[in-house]
């Protein structure tokens, strides 16, 4: 069961926020990257099973996202301490944001909070102007991969080139 | 309004071509494309089952192997993949592939060189090529094609271009192959 209002949809303004992030608990949020696409990867919890782990995959795929100048931020309700240890164990170098206190507040604002007390497994691509360009909700046990994100970033690049003509 | 859960059937976006490493008859009706990581223990577990599928369905199945090293979790995976490519440039890809999966706990540089020697190639030559990353682009191309096709971990198999989202035990793999094989 997901948020009764549903995951935020394309065209909406992405709610602004900052959260403490791994590794050093500095405050990080999408507003700091205006002018670049921002990918928010909400996920249920650190320490999910290995090898098909979504965040480890995203670290490996990060160079491809960076080809679109995109910024990747992982978000769960785990604490910064958990994020730091998790990031270290999986070689994750992009920020993992702690939606920890008040618990799940940012996830709720994006419609990505499940009543079981975790973030949904949800992806949101925010365009360089701060509007939602694409969003996707997966079942918690399904790793959504990277293809949808890359398709959305590619589409964003195409749309902007067209509108710039 | 609640958001419906979205599950898509991923399809292989990079067709099998001459650049691929292919094992089995060229005209096989069933093509299994594996995206794998030589240091991933799940790939290691799938390896003997895939070999057995090829043995039991020799006229039906061909196997294609593409690289999907998740290097931040598996520090030896990239070197292993590039070493397999260096062997492939000498016509020995599958020998190296098999050695790697049969020695997953010996992928450090010293043991890897011994493996290269065991399949009859020169470790010095291959170390030098891997050292200057001669095959890094080739491995990266496989990886990028994989993520664009919806590979979300390893191993990921595509059976006649459709992602197999189930397990990797022999019975299930045979069932999947038989389901798409013409009768």
Image (cartoon, grey):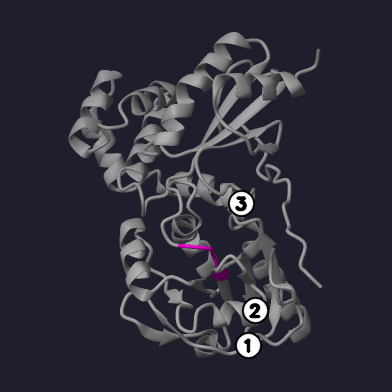
Q: Mark 3 points at which residue?
A: A142
Whether residue A38 is situated above or below residue B135 in the rendered picture: below
Q: Residue at x 70, y 18 (%)?
A: B27
Label 1 crowd (10 A; few <14 / some 14-19 / many >=20) = some
Residue A165 visible within the image: no
Q: Quadrant of the N terminus of chain B?
A: bottom right
Residue A11 placement: quadrant: bottom right
Residue A70 placement: quadrant: bottom right
Q: Mark 2 points at which residue?
A: A110
- Residue farthest to the left? B110
Image location of residue A2, percent across then percent down: 69, 67
Which secondary structure lies at badge 3?
loop
Image location of residue B67, percent across then percent down: 48, 40
Q: Give the number of callouts.
A: 3
Q: Main secondary structure of the magenta part?
A: loop
Range covered by the magenta-colored residues: A41-45
Judge left or right: residue B28 versus residue A64. right
Residue B109 visible within the image: yes
Image location of residue B85, percent across then percent down: 41, 35
Whether residue B157 is situated above or below residue B103 in the rendered picture: below
Q: Marks 2 and 1, Cα distance to the nearest angstrom?
A: 7 Å
Judge left or right: residue A36 versus residue B132. right
């Amino acid at each position: 069961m997901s948020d009764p209002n549903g995951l935020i949809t394309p065209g909406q303004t992405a709610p602004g926020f900052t959260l403490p992030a791994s590794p050093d608990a500095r405050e990080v949020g999408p507003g700091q990257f205006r002018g670049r696409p921002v990918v928010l990867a909400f996920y249920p919890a650190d320490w999910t099973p290995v090898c098909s782990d979504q965040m480890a995959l995203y670290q490996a795929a990060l160079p491809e996202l960076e080809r679109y100048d995109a910024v990747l931020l992982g978000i769960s309700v785990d604490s910064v301490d958990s994020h730091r240890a998790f990031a270290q164990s999986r070689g994750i170098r992009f920020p993992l944001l702690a939606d920890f206190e008040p618990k799940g507040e940012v996830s709720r604002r994006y419609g990505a909070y499940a009543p079981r007390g975790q973030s949904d497994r949800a992806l949101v691509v925010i365009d360089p102007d701060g509007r939602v360009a694409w969003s996707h909700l997966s079942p918690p046990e399904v790793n959504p991969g990277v293809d949808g994100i890359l398709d959305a970033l590619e589409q964003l690049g195409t749309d902007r080139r067209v509108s710039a003509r | 309004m609640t958001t419906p859960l979205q599950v898509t059937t991923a399809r292989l976006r990079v067709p099998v071509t001459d650049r691929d490493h292919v094992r089995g008859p060229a005209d096989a009706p069933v093509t299994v494309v594996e995206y794998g990581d030589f240091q991933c223990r799940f790939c290691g577990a799938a390896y003997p089952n895939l070999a057995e599928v090829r043995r039991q369905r020799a006229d039906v199945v061909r196997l294609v192997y593409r690289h999907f090293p998740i290097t931040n979790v598996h520090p030896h995976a990239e070197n292993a993949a590039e070493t397999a490519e260096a062997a492939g440039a000498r016509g020995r890809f599958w020998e190296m592939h098999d050695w790697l999966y049969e020695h997953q706990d010996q992928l450090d540089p010293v043991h890897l060189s011994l493996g290269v020697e065991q399949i009859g190639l020169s470790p010095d030559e291959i170390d030098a090529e891997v050292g200057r990353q001669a095959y890094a682009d080739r491995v990266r191309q496989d990886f990028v094609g994989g993520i664009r096709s919806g590979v979300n971990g390893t191993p990921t198999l595509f059976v006649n271009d459709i992602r197999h989202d189930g397990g990797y035990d022999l019975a299930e793999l045979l069932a999947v192959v038989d389901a798409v094989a013409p009768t």
